[in-house]
């Protein structure tokens, strides 16, 4: 298989170098560049065309959120995996809204980081359900006017009752297998429902679907499971 091309963006040289040293020995990855701020990350991504950008969300010149938004617009096939020092950080929600495929706290293991990169490369979101639901319960209150992917009433009204139920279960932190078990459906059927509801809601991935569920009122803040 062709190695996944990775760009690492972090304003702390020690952290940036550490991430590169973790990823470089793995034959599944090729670190193609390093950026010390968001503007540099966007410029390098345009030139080097990485598959995945591992993006710190707090950086000078251009922060990781704005850099993610630019990359999502200019290079839609480039996946962004946001990193945060803290589990509960409003900038992480902003990064997901901007188009990041997920986020990880910086204290994850090398194995978790590698697995997350492989997953986001396929277009799937990587956000621990417990962290995502807790974070969104804390920070998402009402729709933000500038949000790129709100869930308009007309879009959510187009969902079938089954799609709405699948959406609700996604928002409470369940993965596909758990949703299949809860609704007595096959995993492939659940995936088909998810593909359809993502298209109707105009969301890119699971993370944005959860945000849309809170912002639309489908799920109330604090109602999610998973602790």
Image (tube, rainbow, N blue to C red):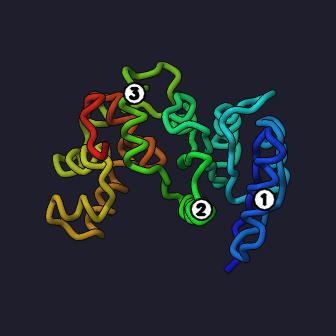
On screen, residue 120 above or below 66: below
Q: Earlier in the sequence, mark 3 or mark 2?
A: 2
Report x, y in % for residue 150. 42, 30
Judge from the rendering whether residue 79 lies leftward or rightward of residue 163; answer left or right.
right
Tell me where residue 211 sits by quadrant: top left
Taking the spot 64% from the left edge, 36% from the top edge, the residue there is 69
Please tell me whether residue 222 is drawn above or below residue 81 in the rendered image. Answer: above
For the residue pair 23 and 108, the one nearer the viewer reads as 108
Residue identifier under label 2: 121
Position of 38 compared to 194: left or right?
right
Query: For numbered disc 1, what is the local secondary structure?
Result: helix
Residue neighbourhood size for the residue with mark 3, other residues' Cα within 10 Å, grouped as few (<14), some (14–19), many (≥20)? some
Give the residue at mark 1: 20
* Residue 184 drawn above or below residue 65: below
- Please identify, in this view, whether the residue under mark 1 or under mark 2 is nearer the observer: 1
Residue name at image x 44 percent, y 41 percent: 208
Q: Is residue 16 above or below residue 187?
A: above
Gap between marks 1 and 3 measured at Cα: 32 Å
SS type, badge 2: helix
Neighbourhood count class around disc 2 (C-alpha, 10 Å): few under 14, some 14–19, many 20 upward: many
- Give whichever of discs 1 and 3 has the lower sequence position: 1
Q: CA distance from mark 3 to mark 2?
A: 28 Å
Determine whether, in the image, residue 62 is placed left or right of residue 72. right
Q: Which mark is residue 138?
A: 3
Mark 1 → mark 2, Cα distance in angstroms: 17 Å
Name the quarter where the N terminus is drawn. bottom right
Nearer to me, 4 or 160: 4
Residue at 24 percent of width and 34 percent of height = 223
* Total tally of numbered discs in the picture: 3
């Amino acid at each position: 298989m062709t190695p996944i091309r990775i760009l690492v963006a972090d304003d702390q040289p020690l952290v940036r170098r550490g991430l590169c040293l973790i990823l470089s020995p793995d034959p599944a990855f090729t670190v193609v560049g390093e950026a010390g701020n968001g503007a540099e990350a966007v410029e390098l991504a345009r030139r080097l065309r990485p598959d995945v950008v591992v993006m710190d969300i707090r950086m000078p010149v251009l922060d990781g959120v704005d850099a993610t938004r630019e990359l999502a617009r200019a290079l839609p096939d480039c996946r962004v995996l946001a990193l945060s020092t803290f589990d509960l950080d409003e900038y992480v929600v902003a990064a997901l809204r901007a188009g990041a495929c997920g986020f990880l706290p910086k204290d994850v293991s090398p194995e978790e980081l590698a697995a997350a990169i492989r997953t986001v490369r396929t277009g799937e979101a990587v956000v621990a359900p417990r962290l995502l639901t807790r974070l969104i319960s804390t920070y998402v209150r009402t729709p933000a006017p500038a949000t790129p992917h709100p869930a308009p009433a007309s879009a959510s009204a187009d969902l079938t009752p089954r799609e709405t139920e699948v959406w609700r279960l996604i928002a409470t932190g369940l993965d596909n297998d758990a949703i299949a078990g809860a609704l007595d459906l096959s995993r492939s059927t659940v995936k088909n429902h998810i593909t359809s509801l993502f298209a109707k809601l105009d969301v890119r991935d699971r993370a944005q679907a959860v945000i849309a569920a809170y912002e639309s009122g489908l799920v109330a803040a604090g109602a999610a499971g998973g602790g």
